Amino acid sequence: MVFTPSPVPGGMPQALLIGGTRFIGRHTVQEFREHGYDVALFNRGNHENPFADDPEIEHIEGDRTNDSALEAARSTVAPDVVVDLVAYKPREVETAVSVFEDLDAYVYISSGAAYGDEEIPKREDETRLFECTAEEAVDDSGSSYGPRKAEGDRIVARAAERGVNAMSIRPPIVYGPHDYTDRFAYWIDRVATHDRVLVPGDGTNLWHRAYAGDVASGIRTIAEAGSPGESYNVGDRTAPTMSGMVELLAAALETDVELVPASERELSVADLSLEDFPLYRDPPHLLSTEKLASIGWEATPLAESMAASVAAYRERQDPTIEPGPDRETEERVLEVLDTL
């Protein structure tokens, strides 16, 4: 059964975003606004609100871990759709599906990290999810992130069994404008500022990525056409290798670049490892996105998503990018490779 938002007579449907001021949230605000929704944000106000000067976007300050604050936000906004961008622990999802149990849609942002088996590709209804222990459920470390997200997905599925219109979306690594992690900007910067780019391994590393705008459109598509209890993968329509990604960035930057692959042994001359480079993952990580596409979602062509990411890089005020090896260290490896 498919549920669609049903606005009050004479009005627009109301979306409440838990979070909403950073990265995926900013794209999601834009996505819902462009498709005829009123939008309200609920968060602690710990980060700068890019919509502070927009009188049409309501901002309610509160802590989502405070059940009363979440209930007050619901009463204030009276949403048709809730998008939960910052649920990191199972208890938070459990509370949310209870507070918002009778809405047209509750969409939980899960992750491709929820998958516990290394299959290619990972499919929503086939690939095993991580289990989540009681200790992991309340942990804040990166090692428990996948299990916590997987448990959130199971809570969503159980909520749907009792009639809650809850669904989830599973993105892999997300890139695009407003990305505060700089993982993707690291590679844009290398291509933009150097003729030679050091690539970890043989360049065939594959870590599926998702353009932030596509995650946002996926969220809206699920809210409008998804089935309660279901989870949907989201990601680029095609998944280029690391070398392929660098070449796409070179095309977007209208420049030429030499790719220089380096093995673990070659990187060790500068005390580097393959994992020191952002977006490197072994084994490969690839998600099937056919299920989301089957309900009307479409991915942005790579040339467009790369161009938007490059434009955001060029517009940034702070040139500092720190998520990977510094160039001086990379030059040590390049010098050794030149002697081989």
Image (cartoon, helix red, strand yellow):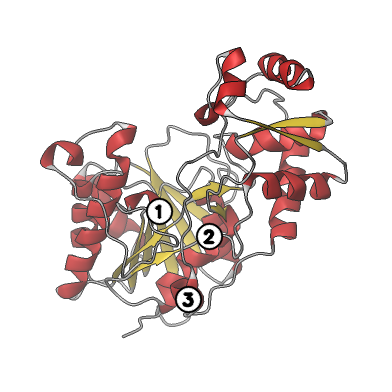
Residue 205 location (% of width, % of height) = 57, 44
Query: Does residue 109 sit above or below 36 in this rendering?
Result: above
* Alpha carbon separation for disc pair 2 and 3: 33 Å
Give the residue type at disc 3.
Answer: Gly
Q: Quadrant of residue 15?
A: bottom left
Q: Which residue is mark 1?
A: 112
Give the residue type at disc 1.
Answer: Gly
| In-image side of 280 versus 245 (left or right) | left
Residue 245 location (% of width, % of height) = 68, 48
Q: Which residue is mark 2?
A: 235
Q: Earlier in the sequence, mark 1 or mark 2?
A: 1
> How many numbered marks does the figure carry?
3
| In-image side of 265 versus 39 (left or right) | right
| In-image side of 22 versus 82 (left or right) | right
Residue 57 location (% of width, % of height) = 52, 54
**Which residue is most to the left?**
134
* Alpha carbon separation for disc pair 1 and 2: 10 Å
Q: Which residue is mark 3?
A: 11
Mark 2 Cα-neighbour bin, 10 Å: few <14, some 14–19, many ≥20: many
Query: Does residue 168 sit above or below 110 in this rendering?
Result: below
Element at label 2: loop
Q: Earlier in the sequence, mark 1 or mark 3?
A: 3
